[in-house]
Amino acid sequence: TIKACLFDLDGVIVDTAKYHFLAWKRLADELGINFTEDDNEKLKGVSRVRSLEIILELGGKTLSEEDFNSFMTKKNDWYLEYVDQMKEDEILPGVLDFLKALKAEGVKVALGSASKNAMRILNLLNITDYFDAIIDGTSVSAAKPDPEVFLKGAEATGTTPAECVVFEDAEAGVEAAINGGMRVVGIGEEEALGKANIVVPGFANFSVEDLKKALA
Ligand code: BG6
Ligand code: MG
């Protein structure tokens, strides 16, 4: 049985990767580091701190702690400039119907995201009320693939890991779910997410009924 569905945010509910890219690109330019959309793939599901570390590694640069922190703040300010323009129509296709169907069936819904901006984004998209629990970058200490974020989601929804299904677009997120003893639906391409129980391109042609059948 499925008693709770735990959703990653970035790349599952909304495509924020393009805004992360624009902000990191602007920062990399300022640092004189070449940063491409391909490089951006490496930042999916990765924390803000680790993202900047990866970019510095790409450019073979180091920063003092003070500069590191001020560059992170700068990136986030730029990111939020883009994010704050977001409207409900940026919710990825099929997501809203899927959430509504879960609610109708009494399945608990939780967010499991690494982002510290998750609440702000859910509010902008007007979907905060769909979530029985919100676990985000402000409430976890260990990054995916550590299962902490999803285990907290199970706890907050009063369910056991075996009763939960996680939806993830990042490899580290799929691993976090598996590490937590949960079933997982990969959102994206089979190639990167092969460890998931099933992989679908998105929610556009995927219903709660399809989910149940696939996991039965
Ligand atoms: C993840 C994104 O959900 O959140 C990462 O996939 C991002 O790209 C991470 O770095 C942290 O997000 P934020 O909003 O706290 O900078
Ligand atoms: Mg993601």
Image: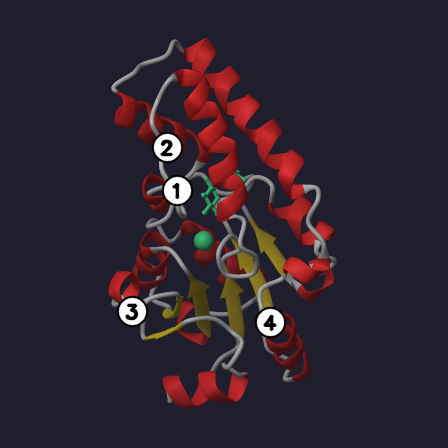
Contact between labelled residues 2 and 1, with CB atoms less than 8 Å apart = yes
Type of residue at label 1?
Val
| Left or right placement of residue 86 versus residue 157 in this view | right
Rendered view: 211 above or below 173: below
> Mark 2: is the Cβ under 8 angstroms from ligand 1?
yes
Q: Distance between the residues labelled 3 and 1?
A: 20 Å
Secondary element at tag 4: strand
Quadrant into which the C terminus falls: bottom left
* CA neighbours of label 1 inside 10 A, class few (<14), some (14 to 19), many (20+): many
Q: Where is residue 198 in the image (x, y as percent from the top left)?
A: 34, 76
Rendered image: mark on residue 50: 2
Residue shown at 69%/61% (left/top)?
89
Label 4 belongs to which residue?
108
Residue shown at 27%/27% (left/top)?
58
Type of residue at label 3?
Glu
Residue shown at 53%/83% (left/top)?
208
> Mark 1: is the Cβ under 8 angstroms from ligand 1?
yes
